[in-house]
Image (tube, rainbow, N blue to C red):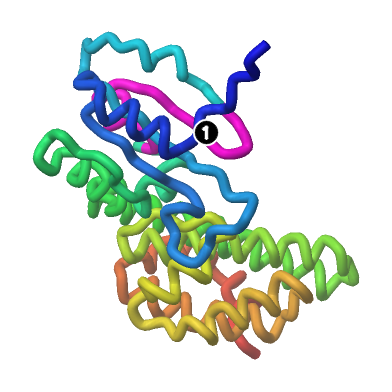
Amino acid sequence: MTVQKPMTYDAFVELATADSAVVGLVLKGSRAHEGMTTDRSDHDLYVVLADGATTNLARFTGLRTPALDLVVLSLDEFRAVGMPGFERYALARARIVLDRLDGVIARILADKARLDVGGAFRAADDWLDAYANSLYRSVKNTRDGHALAARLDAADSVRFLLELLFALDGRPRPYNKYLQWELARFPLPGWDTGQLLDTVGLITATGDVSAQRRLFARVEAVTRQAGHGAVLDAWGSDLHLMRPT
C-alpha cells in the first residue's frame, strides 16, 4: 500500500497558484518575520478565494500539519479578519506570496497595519485608563504588603501600557513573541527601545514601584500631549500615588 505524504508548503503554493479561483496567498507568523524562524516553524498561510468562487482547494480548509497550517476564505472574509481581533497584528506584518488583484491584497494588509485615527484615539483612552488602574493597584498592594498581587498587577499594567503606546502610534500591538522584533525595526516615536524594554522587563519581573512611577511620569506627559488628559484627571488625587515621590 502506498503511503501518501503530507502536503508540503511548496507543493500547496504550486497547486494554489495554478487555480484561478485563488486571488491571494498570504503568509503570516514566524515565516513572515525575518530571523524568527526555527526548525519547528510551520507555514501559516491564508488562501484567499475570489468572492463566490468554487474550488477543489476547499478540501484543504482547516488543514493543520507540523509543516502547514491553512486558512481558506473568501476575499470579503479576508478583509474582515482582525478588524477588530487578535489576528490583526499577524496580518499587519504578513508577507504576500500571491496577489492576482493588482495590489488589492497589499492594500488590505496595509489597512490592517494602521488604526483609523478616531478608533486609535478611543482605544488609547481605554488602554490608558486600564494601565493607570493596574499601576494604582500594584503600588497600593506593595504599600499594603501584598507582594504577589503587586507583581501581578504590575504585569497587567505593562500589557495595557504596550497596547496604549502602539495605539498612540496608530498600530496594532505585536504579540509578545514579536515585540522586540517589531521595536527593533519599527521603533515607537519618542521612545528609546532599549530603555523601554529594560523597564518593562524590570517591572514585570519585580513590580518595582520606583520603576513604575518613573515610567508613569513619562506616560503621563506623552498622553497629555496627545489629548488624553481627561482620562488622567478623572483619577483625581489618586494620581499622587502613581507619580514619582
Amino acid type, callout 1: Asp
Residue 12 to residue 194: above or below: above
Queried whether the magenta region covers residue 45, the answer comes back as no
Which residue is labeled 1 in the image? 69
Say how many tags the image has.
1
Query: Is 66 positioned to the left or the right of 141 in the image?
Result: left
Q: Residue at x 47, y 52 (%)?
A: 31
Residue 34 to residue 218: above or below: above
Queried whether the magenta region covers residue 66, the answer comes back as yes
Q: Residue at x 9, y 40 (%)?
A: 102
Q: Residue at x 25, y 26 (%)?
A: 18
Residue 131 to residue 123: above or below: below
| x and y, in percent, of residue 69 in the image | 52, 33
Q: Quadrant of residue 165?
A: bottom left
Q: Residue lying farthest left? A: 102
| x and y, in percent, of residue 219 in the image | 47, 76
| Quarter of the figure that contains the C terminus | bottom right
Q: Residue at x 78, y 67 (%)?
A: 151
In the foreground, 132 or 195: 195
- Is residue 85 visible in the rendered structure shown here? no
**Residue extent of the magenta highlight:** 64-82
- Is residue 17 visible in the rendered structure shown here? yes
| Quarter of the figure that contains the N terminus | top right
| x and y, in percent, of residue 217 in the image | 52, 82
Q: Residue lying farthest right? A: 145
| x and y, in percent, of residue 121 in the image | 31, 56
